[in-house]
Image (cartoon, rainbow, N blue to C red):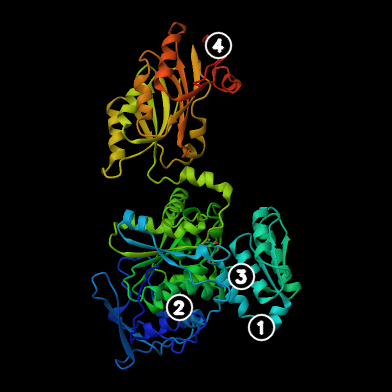
Amino acid sequence: MLGISRTTRTTVVSTLQRGISRGSPHHRLGGCLLCPNTTTDTTQWPRFQSTAAQADDDTNNNTSSTRLSTEDAEMIRFPTKDGEGKPVLLNAKEHAVGYLSKILNARVYDAAQETELQHAKNLSAQLQNKVFLKREDTQQVFSFKIRGAYNRMAHLTKDQLASGVVACSAGNHAQGVAMSARMLGCRAVIVMPLATPTIKVNAVRVHGGPTVEVRLFGNNYDEAAAEAKRLKHEEAMTLIHPFDDPYVIAGQGTIGMEILKECVTQPLDAIFVCCGGGGMLAGIAAYVKRVRPTVKVIGVEAEDAAGMTASLREGRVVTLPGVGLFADGAAVKTVGTETFRVCNKLVDDMITVNTDQICNAIKLSYNDARVVLEPAGALGVAGLKKYVEDNEITGQTLVAITSGANMDFDRLRFVSERADGSEKTLAVTIPEEPGSFRALYSLIWPRNVTEFSYRFDTDDRAHVFVSFQPVKNIEHDFEAVMDSLQENGFGCLDLSENELAKVHIRHLAGGRAHADHERIFRFDFPESPGALQRFLLSLDFHWNVSLFHYRNHGDDFGRVLVGLQVPETCDKNLNNFLRTLGYQYVEETNNAAYTSFLRHKDSVDSTTPSDTTSD
Ligand SMILES: Cc1ncc(COP(=O)(O)O)c(C=O)c1O
């Protein structure tokens, strides 16, 4: 926790924020920034103009643009790093209604918890900013979605509750509606596509109760949504929308309220909010830009599902032709009409991040909070990191919402494969001759090699697939490695951003080769710097390495497959080499998988009467 003392202050905002503790009546609403010389600084954020006063006014058809007289106005200085504070004028009269009121009156705390604002120490040190995580993943349903769903349902009339609710979702919204239905004792039908994984169906059943029915219907989301609409009309049930509803938006807006409450006496520069349909982004922006307008609210989307970014750019709701499903919780083709309206007025900027950046954010969040976030849940952290790096920002106080942790366990393998943001991948061409493998490696050494795939070819050249981590403190270290490889006659190609290479080619590199006298060994290399160097240095210079495959899987030892072309006369030397090297190994020269897939039928055999092992 931030550990901020809640000192008494006489401003409207502090009164407002003191009044938002669980269930307390809010005796005074307000807070405005209509003074022309104290509005949000939008100069850094040219894309979207923040006019904080407008969204609420429009919600309530309140077109008043009354200028403040000095008596009406109250001045507030928000804390900043240097302690000075930027003065902002506030006016209690201007917007006693609208989203501010809806958020302050939101009924969320029967079902949701006020979550921790956790100092992310490692991320702060790495990015040289003070970074906090708003831990929405710690809600009972492991996502923030309970706030909006419960607030919407708690505001239904008795008759509406008696008729029941319907929702269509295969994700976190479904769990929020199910839990809310259980708490409010109302009937709920959750429609999910037929192919929804059992784990998600079960999660809804667990959070729901006897009044909650899961109906599996349709081959995709659209067909399931059509069934939900049919139920709404034919059975007079109330449809609970996942984002495009003022009560849902207001429920999610309570996250913004909690953040500001924690930060009353602290500087706060920006909040990074993941965006799918835009409910959470709109809710947080509606509160923050009203109450503490100097704080930037920045939306983060997956770059292959960036519907809000596209819509804000076009100035209208845009339907994407398709969306990537990696951050499935936030994969929405069409953002809401209402969420767009609010975001268009209040959000300072949007950032898009790619799959690797999301995986990296999952890892960074794990390092700080020991939580495995789902991809959508890590968008805020990924966006925060990108924003800091792109804008070279230091010394600021930044918050990222960690919005959900309903992570499918089976996806962890992919995430960990892609999570290392510092890993660079190269295709290198080397002359097919003894010693060139060692020469190549010595140009990369002592950098940490995380992957190495090499297979002999009958040509005079061979292609190597290699990944490594450039040295962090040396500027342009990766470029320096590429230069030195080129200077030494090793043509190389940067594949670090190449999706085909990273998903497929890394597993296919190599193949069947015409390598005479080849012997194959499966080694356990100690997972320590220098293990490969030691192997190469101990190797007889005259033997050709015809195959080498290694990928770091986080084991306590590295699993390495090696092919060596060893003339029959050298058997004794080979045995000596294996013994003095001291690494565990198993010879696989007669393994059917090797002979079927990696050895050319015309290759001259080695004499391997019985395969050997180190044991
Ligand atoms: C974990 C998570 N993060 C973010 C989002 C996006 O929320 P919204 O649709 O309110 O933008 C969702 C939506 O379900 C989610 O489940």
| Mark whose residue sits in front, 3 or 1 | 1
Task: Tell me, for residue 55, which label it has, or none.
Answer: 2
Under mark 2, the amino acid is Ala
- Whether residue 511 sits left or right of residue 285 in the image: it is right
Under mark 3, the amino acid is His
| Mark whose residue sits in front, 2 or 4 | 4
Q: CA distance from mark 4 to mark 1?
A: 81 Å
Residue 143: quadrant of the picture = bottom right
Task: Tell me, for residue 602, which label it has, or none.
Answer: 4
Q: CA distance from mark 3 to mark 1?
A: 17 Å
Nearest to N terminus: mark 2 or mark 1: 2
- Whether residue 225 sits left or right of residue 505 in the image: it is right
Nearest to N terminus: mark 2 or mark 4: 2
**Marks 4 and 1 close (CB-CB < 8 Å):** no
Q: CA distance from mark 2 to mark 4?
A: 75 Å
- Whether residue 437 sits left or right of residue 309 in the image: it is left
Looking at the image, residue 130 lies above or below residue 282 = above
Q: Determine whether the residue tagged by mark 3 lies in a helix, strand or loop.
A: loop
Residue 215, image x and y in percent?
Answer: 73, 62
Image quarter (top left, top right, bottom left or bottom right) of the N terminus: bottom left
Q: How many marks?
A: 4
Query: Can you tell me whether the CB of the residue at mark 4 lies under 8 Å from the nearest atom of ligand 1?
Result: no
Q: CA distance from mark 2 to mark 1?
A: 26 Å
Q: CA distance from mark 4 to mark 3?
A: 65 Å
Q: Disc 1 designates what residue?
A: 157
